[in-house]
Image: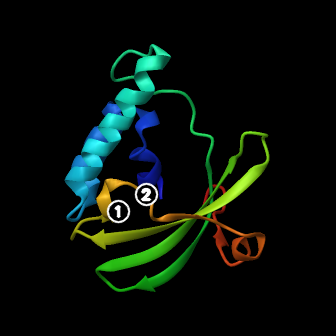
Amino acid sequence: MHIVVRVTPQVGPTVFGPTLRTQVVGTDAAAMRVQVAQAYDELRAPSGVAYGQPIGHLYATLRGYRILSYTDDEVTLFLLTEAPDVSGTPVAASTELRLRWTGADWALVAPAGGTFDQAVTAASPAEVTTFLPFIAGG
């Protein structure tokens, strides 16, 4: 699932650029490239970070996944993340992702409009229990 982290603006264009070009597919892939680059510029300007460098920290932690459907060519799953809210309290979120087999590797199918805005929902404590946890080192 590291591909999801590699397409965030915070990692910088030396990471998200090649990832978006080679590991993101679908009708909204071009929109996603534009959106991530714009978000990077918006974050970079007030931070004073030189172009190309990572910006700030990613506070979200990948916690687990739940497969919704799987074929030899495509998988749809929910990815569970956890991040602190403004008070520092951990908040869980579920993001629906589609991955497509390209013949050599799995690629992320760009979400609608090139952003994850419509794919992310808050995950209730009951919903969190339905995810398979990621295992350190596994």
Q: Residue at x 57, y 39 (%)?
A: 58
Above or below, 127 relative to 91: below
Circle 1: element type: loop
Give the alpha-carbon distance from disc 1 to disc 2, as whole Å.
Answer: 6 Å
Q: Amino acid at mark 1?
A: Pro
Q: Residues within 10 Å of mark 2 (few under 14, many from 20)?
A: some
Q: Is residue 21 visible?
A: yes
Q: Residue at x 35, y 86 (%)?
A: 71
Which percent across, then down, holds residue 16?
Answer: 34, 40
Q: Residue at x 71, y 45 (%)?
A: 85
Circle 2: element type: loop
Q: Residue 52 got which mark?
A: none
Q: Amino acid at mark 2?
A: Phe
Q: Is residue 109 visible?
A: no
Question: Decide: marks 1, 2 in contact (CB < 8 A)?
Answer: yes
Above or below, 59 relative to 74: above
- Please give the residue where the numbered disc 2 appears in the rendered image: 116
Above or below, 61 relative to 118: above
| Quarter of the rendering occupied by the C terminus | bottom right
Above or below, 25 relative to 48: below
Horizontal side, residue 56 vs residue 92: left or right: left
Q: Quadrant of residue 23?
A: bottom left
Mark 1 or mark 2: name the one nearer the start of the chain. 1
- Please give the residue where the numbered disc 1 appears in the rendered image: 111
Q: Residue at x 38, y 15 (%)?
A: 50
Q: Nearer the viewer, residue 51 or 39?
A: 39
Which percent across, then down, holds residue 14?
Answer: 32, 32
Horizontal side, residue 94 vs residue 118: left or right: right
